[in-house]
Image (cartoon, coloured by chain):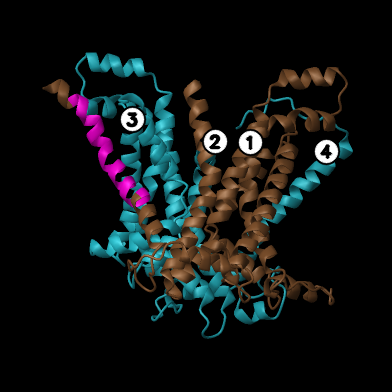
Chain colours: A cyan, B brown
Amino acid sequence: MSRISQDNAVAGSRLTRALIYTVLIFFVIYYLLPLYVMVANSFKPLDEIRGGDLMALPNVWTLEPWRDAWSNAQIGVEATGLKPYFMNSFMIVIPAVTLSTIVGALNGYVLTKWQFKGHGTVFAMLLLSCFIPFQIVLIPAAKVLGFLGISGTIQGLILIHFVYGIGFSTLFFRNYYAAFPTELIRAAQIDGASFMQIFMRILLPSSGPIIVVTVIWQFTNQWNDFLFGASFSGFDSTPMTVALNNLVNSSTGVKEYNVHFAGAIMAALPTLFVYIVSGRYFVRGLMAGAVKG
Amino acid sequence: MKFLIQRWIPRLVLAPSFLLVVLFVYGFILYTGYLSMTDSKMLPSYGWVGFENYSRLFGLRHWNTAVTNLAIFGILYIGISSALGLFLAILLDQKIRAEGFIRPIYLYPMALSFIVTGTAWKWFLDPGIGIENTMHAWGWASFHFDWIKNRDYAIYTVVMAAVWQSSGFVMAMFLAGLRGVDNEIIKAAQIDGASGVTIYRRIIIPMMRPVFLSAFVVLAHLAIKAYDLVIALTGGGPGRATELPATFMYSYTFTRNQMGVGASSAIIMLIMIFSIIVPYVYSELKSGDQQ
């Protein structure tokens, strides 16, 4: 990705290069503009937004919209702000990401180093499960959650995110471990190391990068999930994305655009933070989801 | 004894995942498939009606709107994202000094939730407070842009927001592809006197075929699944102008109490996605075995 030493460049005049830079900067503005609009208007009093010019910086800077979005805004029945929903999302996502990453690592290990008859079919089934439209599972999943007595709970959403995260986690680890020298494993086996010992002492210590990729991928997807949250969450398990949508699209009362923008940034912050801190791994995950690693 | 245990441990480790996926994915698909042939309304019920739900589905104006919208949305979204992605990747590949600064900016929307993107674009495109209002404030009094409120054009605003979100990612895929092109081929073409544009048009872009394919598969599957963005941006409206199969399925199943029809629409969505994904995954797995 980052090899700059390539020589595909079109040898061009100064004018061409100036043109290239102009276009590139134009698109920098294009991609940043919506974010800028959100940030700038989240610090404006409401009448300033209504008065015009969404592009302008605030005349009067105020933290009120942020305070409102976090702890006062009316979402659903109660005026709790987004805070409890923000917490819900973390309480759903952290266990689900942890579980699906651990299980994915073990699956990848088995599917590459302990192959058995039919391992290809098992992998193909796991792989295909990554791409199903989740609409296809909504009705039976609601039934099963009800049967287990966890419909509308945090636990229910953890289970759902965990199960539908297994496919991608397995895919990532399987492709990563496939490149790991099998001779090392055979040697350890001959020395009497057990299945778990080999995993813990040999594979796991060198799995850092793929763990990061998987955690980021799962975190981003699960944090940003809306469909499962909208379908399966209850009164006190609603995740952030669903709460934000309720806030923005509630038909009652005055539309507080500045509060909506502040709320939208809050919902975006965790994944944006992850992206800024470890963008390289984020991209790698995206690519591995699309192209074979 | 120990040998036997060692032999079975791997399968035991894999078994829970396998069973979960068999139940929660394949079992659920079969169950939804079965429901699509029953008279289920508000709750699942098991009166067999054969393909009646499907014939009702295809007769519904609402469904035809959703499918037409998916076609418009899918073609424009895939086409524009790929073209823009390739274009930006080629520009960024011209030894741009600020690449490390520009690339992450192009890509960050992919980290956002579609609900966030939808919220931002909803107000940005809103004639009341958004771009139209801003242009008026800047003195361009005749500026008019109300597509998001217009039945005939609202679907294009969904395309705009979706392209904004995904085109940077497509750019990254193409950039990775461009960086993998063998220098020798390009040098040879340059010696033959080919111009930069010709090299790209005749040599490099044709070599990007696998990337085009990957981008197509990823974008097509995102398009068919598209749900959150429409909900946040337009809520399927105005009227039903931006309904897609995903929003259709949800509203027929959970708010209109026509679960049988909802289930049949989910099956159609699955067929659409699998007809793209299955051949792709199959060829990927096959080429992987040969390596």
As for residue B47 lying within the magenta part, the answer is: no
Q: Chain of mark 4?
A: A
Indicate left or right for A217 with A114 as reference.
right
Task: Give me the residue at 38% from left, 34% from top.
Answer: A121
As displayed, is residue B114 above or below residue A214? below
Reading the chain from its start, which is encountered first: label 2 or label 3? Answer: 3
Residue under numbered circle 4: A17
Asked whether residue B274 appears in the rendered view, the answer is yes
Tell me the mark number nearer the camera, choosing from 1 and 3. 3
Indicate left or right for B135 with A166 as reference.
right
First to last magenta residue range = B6-26
As for residue B20 lying within the magenta part, the answer is: yes
Residue under numbered circle 2: A291
Tell me the mark number nearer the camera, choosing from 1 and 4. 1
Task: Give me the residue at 86% from left, 24% from top.
Answer: B194
Label 1 amino acid?
Val
CA separation in Å, label 1 and label 3: 30 Å
Label 3 amino acid?
Gly
**SS at circle 4:** helix
Crowding around mark 2 (Cα neighbors within 10 Å: few <14, some 14 to 19, many 20+) is some
Which of the 4 quarters of the picture holds residue B182?
top right
Which of the 4 quarters of the picture holds residue B124?
bottom right
CA separation in Å, label 2 and label 4: 32 Å
Reading the chain from its start, which is encountered first: label 2 or label 4? Answer: 4
Crowding around mark 4 (Cα neighbors within 10 Å: few <14, some 14 to 19, many 20+) is some
Indicate left or right for B246 with B163 as reference.
left
Task: Give me the residue at 75% from left, 49% from top.
Answer: A25
Q: Which mark is residue A118?
A: 3
Tell me the mark number nearer the camera, choosing from 2 and 3. 3
